[in-house]
Amino acid sequence: MATTRLSTKGQVILPASLRDKRGWRPGQVLEVEETPDGILLRAATPFPETARGAAFGILAPSPIGRPLTIEEMHEATETEARARHARGRY
């Protein structure tokens, strides 16, 4: 079992073996939770958890009633890029 010391600033240095095992590098954001047994540290997730149903909207049917072809997607992208360029956006 490794030990560490609490600094006057309240900082704790985690042993390198534990940081390496977890893949934690400088700047890693950690969640801190108080438990009945002590303090729990875990890597924070980079994005908030999303409910499965919240993401399904992107799978809605196409407004034209059928999937777009690759050519139609390219054409739509080019049309939008030209429109933005004409407005001075790019």
Image: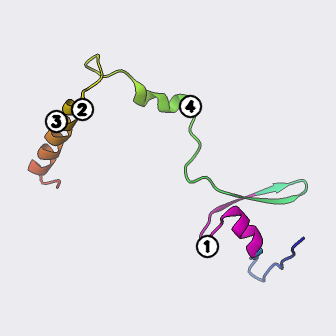
Mark 3 Cα-neighbour bin, 10 Å: few <14, some 14–19, many ≥20: few
Label 4 belongs to which residue?
52
Query: Can residue 26 be seen?
Result: yes
Report x, y in % for residue 24: 65, 66
Q: Quadrant of residue 2?
A: bottom right
- Between disc 4 and disc 3, the foreground one is 3
Disc nearer the start of the sequence (3/2): 2
Q: Is residue 29 above or below residue 69?
A: below
The answer to whether mark 4 and mark 3 are in CB contact below 8 A is no
The answer to whether mark 1 and mark 4 are in CB contact below 8 A is no
Label 3 belongs to which residue?
75
User: Mark 3: which secondary structure?
Assistant: helix
Amino acid tagged 4: Arg
Amino acid tagged 3: Glu
- Tell me: 21 left or right of 72: right
Task: Tell me the magenta residue range.
Answer: 16-32
Amino acid tagged 1: Pro
- Tell me: 72 left or right of 17: left
Identify which residue is drawn at 62% across, 66% down.
Answer: 28
The answer to whether mark 1 and mark 3 are in CB contact below 8 A is no
